[in-house]
Image: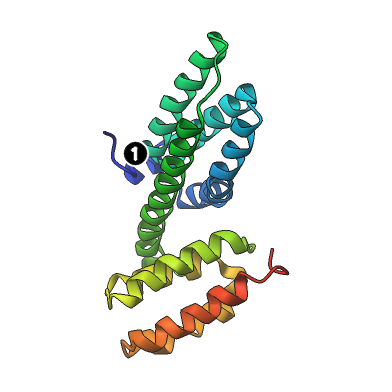
Amino acid sequence: MPQVLNFVGAIELLDNSTALYLEAVQSYFEDIANLPARMDSLLRKADLQEAVRALHTCKGASLTVGANLLSELCRQFEVQLKALRQNEQALEDSARQAMQISLESTASNTRQAITEVLGSLVTHNSAIVISGLNARALVEDLISLRNLLARSDMRALVRHKAICGLHTAASAQLQALTPTLKVFNFAKAVVQCDELISDFSAPNKT
């Protein structure tokens, strides 16, 4: 089974350019956030051709950022759907549901692994940023941060820095957590994180 993330290998393929990696990650996060729902919709309509195309695209994008596990999962599902198309068979509902669960879980783990790596980059280079606001991706990152805070896990400090670097359009709101984290008041930070999740989950956020 491949490792979730091979960051070193990925950035070497990008000429060791952090800027190129971050550019790739920005669009990649948007793609994998939408992949499970898109696949479920396509498979419910029995549109295997488009589903195969979506998996193939994600497979390549995953390799670009070093997300080997998600790339391999997409490859396996791509092979499975191609076989069904060739044999003119339909995908059973149980298999469709299992596929969606696997994609959601692996995509989430991939985001977490990349965010942790970027956290170390942000620590050493405050100029590393990704502009623009993807509220859905931000909420997912905040939920992962909240889970760490709820366990008083010190990795929350690194995760917070990474999230600030990834979502600079929300920098002012995210930095409100900084004073609380500096004094390790995890209980208060959980409350603040819940407020941010609620705020960025609002329908008017894009």
Residue 89 on image: x %, y %:
54, 15
- Indicate whether 126 appears above or below 45: below
Q: Nearer the viewer, residue 97 or 4?
A: 97
Q: Amino acid at mark 1?
A: Gly
Tell me the quadrant of the picture where the C terminus can be found: bottom right
Residue 114 on image: x %, y %:
40, 53
Going 40% across and 41% down the picture, which residue do you hit?
Answer: 67
Going 44% across and 44% down the picture, which residue do you hit?
Answer: 101
Residue 121 on image: x %, y %:
38, 61
Q: Mark 1 sits on what residue?
A: 9
**Left or right relative to 142: residue 8:** left
Residue 124 visible, this orientation: yes
Task: Give the quarter of the image for residue 73.
Answer: top left
Q: Nearer the viewer, residue 28 or 102?
A: 102
Going 53% across and 27% down the picture, which residue do you hit?
Answer: 56
Q: Nearer the viewer, residue 166 or 193?
A: 193
SS of the residue at dot 1? helix
Residue 177 on image: x %, y %:
46, 83
